[in-house]
Amino acid sequence: MNDQDDGDADTGDLARLVGRLDQTLDRLAHAPDFAKPGKVRPVLDTAKRVLLQQGGAAAIEQRAGFIEASGVFAGTDWERPEVLDPALSSGSLTSADADTVVIESLSELRFVAIAVGDLPHPTIPPERARRHLTQVLAINLTMLFGPPDEADRQRQGRLSRVGRSVLRHVAERIGYEQVLEQLVNEIWRILLQRPIQVDHVKQMITQIAVYRDDPEIDMGSGLGADRLITSLYGTTQLCREDPGVEVYRERLAAADRTILGSEATGFARSMHDTGLVSPYHPVLLRFLLDHDDHLLAEALGLTTVGRACLMHHRELVHQLIAEGIHPSTARAVYGLALLLERGILYQRAVAPALWRQLRLELAPAAAQRLVDTFGDVPVPRARLLSGVLTMLGLPLGVGQGDNPTCQAARALSMWANCDPEYLLHVVARAARDDEVVVNFEGHPISSRDLASGVAASDPVDLDPVSLVTVPHLDRIYAEMGRRCIGREGDPHRWVNPEFHGWWAWRGFRIAVDVTTGKLTDLEGFLRDLYATYHPAYNGDQPLIHPQPAGVAVTDTAARFIGWHAIALQRVALDPEGVMRFYFFNPNNDSGQDWGDGVVVSTSGNGERFGESSLPFDHLASRLYIYHYDPLEEGEPSLVGDDDVRRIMDLVHRSWGADRVAPVDLQAQQR
């Protein structure tokens, strides 16, 4: 239903409309399954009219449990609230399609009922519901506080009032001050993961800054918000009042060395503390290119290693700043600083490969892809270079976006981490030639010859490097899988080492029978996992290179959602003495509750930036695939029976609940 004007949509009184809504919900709830689709239309039409009334959102919230139980969400994207992405709420609430606006509104009001404790939910605890709503409000602050503009009125008509009334009701129910407090906490939680893409975070901070300055809007004290705002717009003395980059450039020209040193130190401290980079920071770096390398190192916040790398490759670093670092690519400042701190320019091939990147001529298709996503300022080659610097500095910050391309994202991260010269090779081929060629068991595979991959269309919500390379890598990965058709077992056994790199072990373990989907030799799978990765059973051998692995992702009720690619980074004791798996998760937010007490941590338990972690047994309970070195066998027989049995119980209570083969069940009972 596309609705520009509702006519008499809001002429009736609220009580009458709510009574009609109850009737339509009752008919939907009692309809047989085959008849339910025809009963949904009256519910949505009536709910829209209720939401257009003052007090309508509250009336819907009171009926949230009835609405969900009736089957309104069945068969839609909103059926499983545990997998809903708050970032998508903005598009739904501003849609010109009335059904989309209404069902999104019903879903958000369902979250309100869960958050305040009125609706116990099997998959969403109240705290998670509150966090979801906080993110929704953060992303839609403009709708929450601002009136509809002309574009909204043309696209949605009176329907634009629905989303705004729902958001106001949400904010009133969970509290404006708490919104800001939780929003600030949420931003810090995301920043501690040091993702490459932070545009959504910057947008949230910008909106906080705008509305904090509005005297008509009371958002509370917002402890911690000022630090976030100043990290972008008022980091140092010369840009304290956010004067604009041209004025800031003039102030730098008039500053003495003491002031410049203070500016450099202030920017560096803020950048490394928050993981955010002010648009003024690149202006300072570019100014210092003609003045003082010591201050340049100060502005990047470099330690002894980074300073030595800067001085040894001075000309290259100057060119990287001049070409790739601009106010609109400020994130690359942080990437460059961490790249230098890693010392990877001392690897023989990296510096020449970066010189090639500086001079790279982009294929029209690659350039257009960058322009379509990021615009034409700076030019596509500079945009891609900034992405290269950021990925080499933040290899664990790669995200897959809203795309089923976790394998490609994991590969990019592993190459940036372990084999940066190969990453630069792949980027050059994809950007210059619009083609990537990878060998599979001695035979080349060209992305140019392949029609499709795992993703149905080319991703658009990615960082510059991923945007250019992932379409090629996705097609190659899918083709490797196709070439394994007919082989016994899971194709990842052959694909992972060929796709990711020589360091991926050739030994392969899987806990699921590919043909039946049932668990197979789970006990042996777990014993070998301990013998390969746990220091107490592998001779105290640390993990030398990250290893590809697969997890069975579960929701907060420990129910199976799907298979997902991760990289096992290391195993170590956390500050509390608990042995933990530290791993890379390419999804956009690695802090997840997988149910039954398995809650993924991203900070506070010894994680390095970008790592996720779980106690060893908790991650073991969600792994279904891993690789091992067949030439380095540990001691699987020494693993305690109680440890194995505990993990098997976790599996059987979660993703393996309906996968227990009769023989495994008998073994467990014995």
Image (spheres, rainbow, N blue to C red):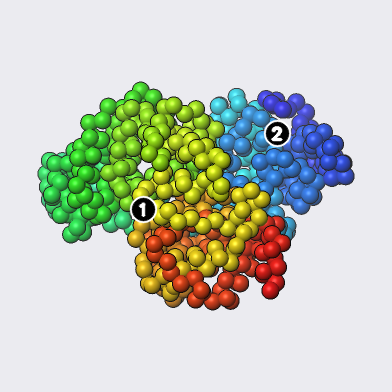
Q: CA distance from mark 1 to mark 2?
A: 50 Å
> Relative to 549, is 71 above or below?
above
Residue 99, which numbered label?
2
Q: Residue 101: which quarter of the image?
A: top right
Dot 2 amino acid type: Asp
Q: Please tell me which residue lies in front, 590 or 272.
A: 590
Tag 1 residue: 503
Work out which quarter of the rendered image holds the N terminus and state it.
top right
Circle 2 packing at 10 Å, graded few (<14), some (14-19), many (20+), is some
Task: State the residue at coordinates (47%, 39%).
Answer: 480
| Residue 548 relative to residue 68: left or right | left
| Residue 630 relative to residue 655: left or right | left
Q: Please tell me which residue lies in front, 58 or 83.
A: 83
Tell me if I can see residue 253 in this picture: yes
Q: Please tell me which residue lies in front, 282 or 57.
A: 282
| Residue 424 relative to residue 400: left or right | left
What percent of the width, then of the height, locates residue 493?
49, 49
Circle 1 packing at 10 Å, graded few (<14), some (14-19), many (20+), is some
Dot 1 amino acid type: Trp
Task: State the residue at coordinates (82%, 33%).
Answer: 38
Tell me if I can see residue 206 in this picture: no
> Relative to 440, is 596 above or below?
below
